[in-house]
Amino acid sequence: MPCLALAVLLAGCGRKSTVQSIDLWIVDWNVDTRDLLNNTILPDFEKKHGVKVRVQYLDWGHLDEKLTISFAGGVQPDVFQVGAEYVGSMAYRGQAMMLDEFMKDWPQHKDFIPAAWDTVCTGGHVYGVPYLSAPRVLVYRKDLMQSAGLPVPPRTWDEWVTSGLKLRKLNARGNVVRTGINLSSGANWSTFITFLWQNGGELLTPDERRAAFNSQEGVEALTFLCDLYNKHKVCPREGIPSAAANVPLFAGGQTAQEIINQFAIKNVIKYAKEFTVDDVGVAPAPYSKRPVVTVWTDWLAISSGTKKKELAWELVKHLTRPDNLIKYNETQYFLPPLRSARNSDYVRNTPFMTEYFDLMDKYGMSLPPIPEWFEIRAGLRNAVDQAVYGAKTPKQSLDDYAKQVDELIAQRERTL
């Protein structure tokens, strides 16, 4: 090879790529999601902006550790996905960038369902954009209720207990083979919060400086939860074993009612043998004072430390563009949290997706943006368990834990 050609070749080998890159972390995904992003959505963005999107597909079990290490080391991703409980801690720690300045030039933000949008807001500021939603509603066996002469659907707590008792089925040995009610989340904090809101209570006081879940409304809500397990016995505390491997209880005909997201319908279509989706109904969970649909929304944040602020915002806008947002949700059977998505083929043609969508829009509530949320939810679960399993009365359990929450909040305020 001539010396001049060799020199040019060697020079070329040492030249670094001038293509700009941006880092994206995705947690909610499957094979179809990855293919959609890698083969369609991200290449479109790369071509338009002349950049390379370096995407990592993570799992929820490692997200917190990865985020902690990356922020501590100053190597955090430019755009990353987080869950429904994160906005308070992200804002408090200064990890998610405030997006207020972008909102005035982005009218699409007004299209998001309020309960989903509330998930990304705290202190009057916006810290992200909703990416998918999963509302929890009452899913019930319409055929069984009609045969038993029950109101369809049950609307009040009392009606719910009555239906649970009538629809519970025992075998000859007295063992439960079909529960009247199954709380898929079990005796834990998320079930209690739904009941608390249904009874007119709140987790914190309006100024968010003290616990409020130990109010009369909270004690009544926890008492009702305990009674479902212990007094009425319509919902087994420890659950019942599935009759078939990997078949959820509702789809397997082993429970008549659940508070659960849209995956209940997907599982009925996939697994149910003794009934079909035509035998199923959905409604707001029975309530005491107000109907509530608890909405879980995962969202996209931009790192406060990104050096590619404008490009990161362009990526978020591209990912949440209505057509891309709908396609992303469709790969995983989630609800796209845009009101305009109700008219999409995906929502209209998927059984019960429109009903879930409308219930989320009308009755949806999202978790409050508490910086200490991860500590509080763990402690709240223990408090609920203590009441359900009889270690303390509902009032004692909530009062005792309210003192701990008050101290957590006070400790944060002392460090401000």
Image (cartoon, rainbow, N blue to C red):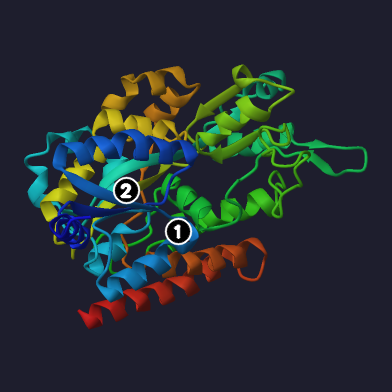
The x, y position of residue 368, in whole percent, is 33, 56
The quadrant where residue 223 appears: bottom right
The quadrant where residue 16 appears: bottom left
Would residue 92 be visible to someone looking at this image?
yes
Q: Residue at x 35, y 39 (%)?
A: 37
Would residue 127 be visible to someone looking at this image?
no
- Taking the image as shown, residue 257 lies to the left or right of residue 375, namely right
Q: Which mark is residue 216?
A: 1
- Taking the image as shown, residue 261 lies to the left or right of residue 159, namely left
Q: SS of the residue at dot 1?
A: helix
Closer to the chain start, of discs 1 and 2, is 1
- Taking the image as shown, residue 350 lies to the left or right of residue 121, namely right
Instruction: Return the residue nearer the eye: 410 or 346.
Output: 346
The x, y position of residue 242, in whole percent, is 75, 43
Mark 2, other Cα within 10 Å: few <14 / some 14–19 / many ≥20: many
Instruction: Return the residue nearer the eye: 367 or 229.
Output: 367
Q: SS of the residue at dot 2?
A: strand
The x, y position of residue 171, in whole percent, is 88, 37
On screen, residue 325 above or below 349: below
